[in-house]
Amino acid sequence: MLFAVTLRAQNSYIIKGKIPFAHKAARAVMSYPPDDKGGAYNADTVNITNGKFEFKGAIGRPQLAELNLIFPKPAGETGRRKESDEGGGMKNVALFYLDGNVDVSFDTAGTATMTGGGKEQLGWKDYEQMILTRNKALNGATATMEFYEELIADYVKAHPDLYVSVDLMDLFTQSAIQPKLVEPMYNSLSKRMQNSEKVLAWKPKLDQAKLAVSGNLRAPDFVLNDTEGKAISLASYRGGYVLVDFWASWCVPCRAENPNVLAAYEKYKDKNFQVLGVSLDEKKALWLKAIAEDQLPWKQVCDFKASKSEVTQLYNISSIPANVLVDPNGKIVGKDLRGKDLHDRLAELIR
C-alpha cells in the first residue's frame, strides 16, 4: 500500500521518439535533474530500433529534460565526434518536460518536434513561442540580459503556478539575487510554487539580499593599499556615496562593465559620488595595465590575494563582477548594480 501511495505522489511519463529511416542515429540519451537538490543529472540511454525509441519512468515533479541522438562511430574511429558531424546547435536535440506522454519526432535534418504532454510541457511550449516572437522583434540585434529579465518576468506573471516559471527564475536566483528583479517574480508565484522545494531553498537568499540593500546594514570598513602603496580606507569616503566595485584584470564581464561604471562616475562625480575599485588580481603589472587600458580615474586598491582577500569575505563576494553602493552614513543601499540598474539606483538617491 505504501509503495502504491509513493507512486501516485510521483509524476509518471512516457517519452516516445521517432526518427526517419535515413537518419543514422543509433541511441538516444535523455538527461534531467532527478530532484531540486542541485545534484548530478540522471542520464538514461536507450537503443533506437527501426527508427523508434522509448523512455518510461516516474519523477517527483516535472523536470526539463534534454534528449540527444547519438551516432555510431565508423569502424576504427576513436574519440568524440565533431559537433558538426552530429548536426551542431539544436540539431538532434530536443528539450521538453517529463510530464505525461510526450511524442518526439525528428526529421532528416535532426530538427525535433514535440507533441502531447501535461500542463508543464504545454507551458514550456508557450515559453518557446514567447522567446521566438520576442527574438524576431529584435530584428537581428543581440538579446541583452535586460531582454531576458523582462521576458521571464512577464512569463512568470502569466504562468504563476508552473514549475517552468520557477525553473526559468534559476537565471536570477542561483547566484547573487537582485531583490528589485526577483521579489516581484516571487510575489507573482502561486502559493504552491512559493512553497516548492526549489523556491524555499533560495527564498532566504532573497530575504538576505533585501536586508542588505535596505539601508539598515553598515558597510564593513577595510583598509587596502592603492596603486602607489598608500593605505586607503572605506571609512575615508564617509559623507558621500561610494560604489565599492569588485573586479579583476582577468575578469571579462568586469572589463565589459567598466565603461558603464565610468559613465555613472562621470555623471555623478560632482554630486557627492565616488567609486572605489577593489581588485582580485594577483599580479600588480596586470592590474595596472588594465586600469590604464580601461581609463579608470578613481582610486584602486588591492592586496593581491585574489579570492582569499579578507575584503571578499567581509562582503560575501563569491564571484565578480560585484559591487556595493554605500550611502553617506556608511550604510549599504545597493548591491550588484550593473548596467541600467546602477544608473536607476543612483538617480533615485542622488538629486
Image (cartoon, rainbow, N blue to C red):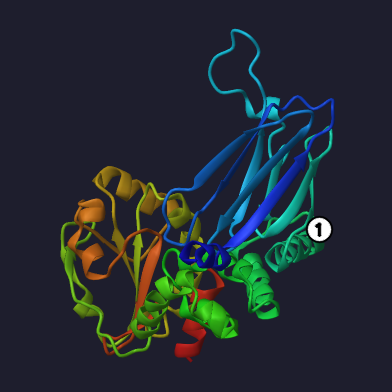
Q: How many marks?
A: 1
Residue at 46% over, 71% down: 197
In x, y percent, where is residue 239?
Answer: 28, 88
Residue at 16% over, 57% down: 229
Q: In which quarter of the image is residue 312?
A: bottom left
Q: On screen, 177 above or below 78?
A: below
Instruction: Looking at the picture, tell me which residue is in the foreground, 241 or 95.
Output: 95
Instruction: Looking at the picture, tell me which residue is in the foreground, 341 or 174.
Output: 174
In x, y percent, where is residue 306?
Answer: 25, 52
Apparent side of residue 287 relative to residue 34 in the rendered image (left or right): left
Instruction: Look at label 1 and name its amino acid.
Output: Asn
Instruction: Looking at the picture, tell me which residue is in the foreground, 334 or 190.
Output: 190
Q: Is mark 1 on a helix, strand or loop?
A: loop
Mark 1 residue crowding within 10 angstroms, few (<14) / some (14–19) / many (20+): few
Q: On screen, 48 above or below 162?
A: above
Residue to which mark 1 is pinned: 139
Apparent side of residue 331 relative to residue 105 in the rendered image (left or right): left
In x, y percent, where is residue 179?
Answer: 47, 80
Residue at 57% over, 66% down: 8
Q: Taking the image as drawn, is residue 281 in sight? A: yes
